[in-house]
Structures are given as structure tokens and as C-alpha cells.
Image (cartoon, rainbow, N blue to C red):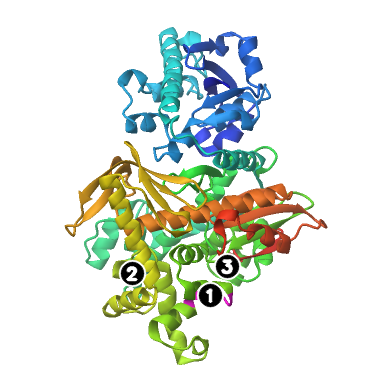
Amino acid sequence: MRTLHIDLETYSSVDIKKAGLYKYVQSPDFQILLFAYALDQGPVEVIDCACGEPIPEGIAAMLGDPEVTKVAHNAAFEIYCLNRRFHSPVCQWHCTMVHALYCGFPASLDAAGRAMGLPEDRRKMGVGKQLIRYFCTPCVPTMRNGGRTRNLPHHDRAKWQLFKDYCRQDVVTEMEIYRRLAGHPVPEQERQYWILDQHINMAGVRVDMELVAGALQMHGRISDELSEKAKALTGLDNPNSVAQLKGWVEENSGLELESLDKATVAELLADKDGEGLVKEVLRIRKELGKTSVKKYKAMRACVCGDGRIRGLLQFYGASRTGRFAGRLVQVQNLPRNYIEGLDTARGLVKAGQPDAVRAVYGDVPDLLSQLIRTAFIPGEGCRFIVADFSAIEARVLAWLAGEEWRLDVFRTHGRIYEASASAMFGVPIEKIRKGNPEYALRGKGKVAELALGYQGGARALVSMGALSMGLSEEELPDIVRRWRKSNQRIQDFWYAVESNAIDTVRYGTVHALPKGIGFHRDRDYLFIRLPSGRELFYYRPEIVTNAYGRSAVGFHGTSQATKRWELTETYGGKLTENIVQAVARDLLCSAMTNLHRAGYAIRFHIHDEVILEAPEGSAMGLGEAIRLMCALPGWAEGLPLDAAGFEGHYYRKD
């Protein structure tokens, strides 16, 4: 097959960062400015569409030709832009951004090129941001520019020529990345998952804009009230100013503060020394700082003309494991809802009745936060079917490690917190139930399950809220010891993963563990093969000495701490986490494929949960959806999957 490498430069008055690709392209003033292309590894040509140059007929025909693979970096952009005029099916495209992510590199063209060490003449040009700002977005009308709201090619011919060079160079960089990654192709199964992801993003999900408008109106009114109250209490001109409020808090509390961030405010409010004026003001700041309004504003910014939001998910957004990442509204971190009577609450917010909300629910900002999920609604004449894998990571970890007592729990009653507490403390599980003194052990079992599966210790327990549960620091090491003793096979799995990875990096040996886990390397990568056959990539691996003076695996990647591309150290528990989360992701993709083939419309998904849309009165239901989700792929034999969910007319956390 031939390859057609493509890069576009476009104009739209819609802010793509806030509104997303789909609303950006749907703008009436959207326009393709430049069309750069190269056939196979040939020279790059740039078509000046803004100045009236037509795309050559032969190239235009290739956009729909199944015998020609179209290649672009972040291909979703080129696909959607070009499909305004041409028919170019997603299945005919290859995305070098997804390919780079699959191989463990950063997403952006520039960062990926730098991480791969591309020579200067193959890298992305550094002038792009200024040129894109000049030609691709509206400009502010001034006397100097004659009051225009847009810069066109004839307004600065030198910049326009540089812009064409920039577009041409993007294709050069993309071609080099494509060439370098060719030795490690994206598996066909992953291509199919990406194609499904594109269709999910293009279809989008309907949003209850009446609720969004009511929430924003109510938030504005409450914010004004709280701001006025803060002014009256503090005497400050602007109590929303961090500098002013920080000085006031220090003066009235006698404390010296480094900041007034969320953690500091929470710590000050948790202080048991009385109530007082300072605490009242800090409570106001906490309410004003709730992020709920940002989600509603994001919904308003990116909703398309048909009332749907598109592009909520990024395929392979977590490049180490292949898990999806949230975009725009960031559905991966939506607040939970706990209140009863969601229907009533939604009705009051839509009607714009903050006093009634306050009378019934008390905390208005908290209510608005809890209603965010419910802003996602099915289309007319449809209902949502929401299904969620139950304790998926704990099940996968037990299956991979062969921890049989845990697998028996998941095959039967599924009460892993109680079972874990029973194994840790030698108490019959029947006694760990409400009303019995032994029920207090469930909390210890729960926090241990959440914190210790990936070689975590006392600090991991603290980060999971052990101290806020009433546990003391002194008893945390004992909880760690008890959990590990009762999960010996999981502990052995950490150490087996670590030792095999070290041996493979150091000596180039090939290793295998049960369930299809494997380790091998080449000149550039350490590979960990998953049960599905997919591989995890660790670029330029080497043996390093860790803080304990022991050998460990290091590799080059984007550091979670610094967000920079650098040498990163890892260990058995972290590698186990990568493997388990990657397997869980493969199970989700398998489940979505089953659902899609059965005719279920997947509107979006969050972690291990799918939100489906089905016509009212159709035979499609929750039971069948769960059956399809839990239908094991051939490589997952013996894994005890389970799922639960609900049906309804808005999304919520069941």
C-alpha cells in the first residue's frame, strides 16, 4: 500500500483548546488554509488553499482510496477537517501520535521528535505558536491594523511564507517519526480499538444545557453573596485575591502561611481550636474555590450546535498502560453524587431556585458539584445503560499472581474488604458485619486493599486516608505486614516481575511468567508482553542504583513528578501496577468491542465504566450489557469478571 502523509493548517474563530476539535471545525468560518502532503517518502508539497490553490485531483482521490494509507500526527484533526469536504474513512488512516504513545513517547509532535533524538532538520520548527496565533485565530481590531478581526496572507507575505515552511516541516517530522517507529507497528487489534474510539468521540453525548445554564446562574448568584459576605467580614477590597486574603489570615490568626491552596485551607479548617472569624472566612473561600463551576463552563464552551459534546476521550492517553485520558470536561475525575432525590435537585437548579436548594440541601456549591454527572443525558427517546466492572484491578492482580483465596472470593460473594480483614486478622468473615465489634476491621481491610496491592507501605496507607479513618501511624506498619503475609503470591509476583525485568535489561535474557506475561528487549526498548499480546514499551532501559543501594530498572519517559522527559526509575510494584492497569484496559476495550458489535451505542466511558445509549422500549438492557462486558477474551481464561450498573435518564454514580 502507498502512504499519503498529511498536515493541515486551519482557521476558525472557535478556541480549539476550550471548545475542542469538533466545535472548532463546525464553526461557519472554519477554513483549511494550507494542505501539506508527501506521497510515500517523497518530497513535501504545500497547497495554499487560502490563496485559492486547489488540492490536486489525484491527491483528493487518494483521500478516499482504501489502497492508500493516510498518515497524520493526531490524525483525528485531519480526518474531521477533511471530512467537511471529502469522504475519508477513519479505517484508512494511521495516527503517528497514537503510534508514538504506544511506543512510550510523548504525544505532541515536537516532544516526540525531541525524545527520539531527531536531528535538527527533521524536527518541528519552533515558530509555530506565533504563526498559528497570527493566521489561525481572530485578531483584535486596532487602528494600526485597520480594524480587521483576522490576518490574511497578504497582510504579511513574509510570515505567510514562513507559515508554509512550518507546515511543510511538520510533514517532514511526521514522516521521520513514522519511519523510526515502523519496526514496532501498532497491532491490528489496537488499530480497531482506535477506530472504535474515533467513532465514539465523533458521535458524542447529549448534554442537559438547561441544567448547565441553571447551575451557572445559581453559582454566579451564590458567589456574589459569598464574596459580599467575605468583604463584610474581612474589610478587604477583593477577598478573592490570594495575596490580600493570605495577609488577612496571617494577621488574624498569628500564623505564617506559604500559600492558601486547597490543602492548606483544608488543614486550617480541620484544626480543632474553635470556630472563629478566620474559619468562617476560610469556609467561604473553600466554597468559592469549588471546581464544579469549571466543569459546567467547560460543557458550555464545547457543546456543539446539536447539543452534544464530542471528543471527551483521548485514546492511549496514559501512554505507559494505554488507558484512556479525559479531555475538555475531564470526565475521568467527575465528583461523586451522594444525595437522595437527584430528580428534585435537578428540577430546582433548572428552575433557578437557590433558596429552595439551600433549604432542602443546605450547601449549594456542593449540590452543584454533585449534579455535574447528571448533566450528561441520553438522546430523545433513549435511555442510558451504565455498567461498571467490579473491583477490576483487584481481580486482575489476584488472577495474574495466582492468589487463589482472593479468586475464590471474587468467584463467590465478592466482599473483598471483609475477606481481606478476615485473612489479615484471623477473624471469621461472618463476624465482620454491621452491629458486631469486628466490623471495625473492615475499614482496615478496605484501606489495605486500596493502598497495598502495588508494594505500597505505610505512606501509601496515609495517602489513601488511613489517618482520617481513625487509624494511628503506629499501627500502619502492622497493617502492611499483615496484608503482605496474607497475600504471599502477590508479594512474590512483585519480586518476580522486578527480577525478570532487571535480568532482561542487564543480560538481554527472555523471561516468562504465568498468564502470558513475558519480558524481552532489543537495542532501544524493554518490552513487557501482556496476556492479550500487546506490549508495554520502556525506552532506553538501563540498570540504575536506587536509594536503597540495590539494582533497579531505569528508562527514559515523561516523569509524573516533573512532567519532563528524563531517566525514570521503577520497581516491581510499579511495574506490576502498569501490567494490571494495562490488562484492565484491554478488558475494557474487549468489552466495548462486544457491546459495539451487539449494537449498543457507547457514548463515553470512565475508567472501567461504560455509558451506553439505547432506545426506549428496545430489548437492549442492563443484563445483556453486563453479560457482554464480562464475556472473557480467549487470553483471560479463569479471570472472575463481574459488573453492575443501572438504567436511567441521566448519568450518575450508582
Q: Which disc is residue 408 wearing?
A: 1
* Amino acid type for the residue under numbered disc 3: Arg
Specify the quadrant that holds the N terminus. Answer: top right
Question: Of circles 3 and 2, which is in front?
Answer: 2
Whether 412 is drawn above or below 287: the answer is below
Specify the quadrant that holds the C terminus. Answer: bottom right
Whether 120 is drawn above or below 465: the answer is above
Please tell me whether residue 56 belongs to the stretch shown in magenta.
Answer: no
Q: Residue at x 57, y 60 (%)?
A: 637
Q: Residue at x 57, y 67 (%)?
A: 640
Q: In the image, 234: left or right of 140?
A: left
Q: Residue at x 59, y 60 (%)?
A: 371
N-terminal-most mark, 3 or 1 = 3
Distance, label 1 to label 2, CA atoms, is: 29 Å
Residue that extends furthest to the left in the rendered view of this protein = 549
Which residue is the site of mark 3?
A: 358
Label 3 secondary element:
helix
Q: Which disc is residue 462 wearing?
A: 2
Numbered range of the magenta stretch? 412-417
Question: Of circles 3 and 1, which is in front?
Answer: 1
Residue 620 shows in the view? yes
* Amino acid type for the residue under numbered disc 2: Val
| Percent position of residue 78, x then y | 56, 27
Q: Nearer the viewer, residue 158 or 363?
A: 158
Res 566 → quadrant:
top left
Residue that extends furthest to the right in the rendered view of this protein = 617
| Percent position of residue 553, x then y | 27, 50
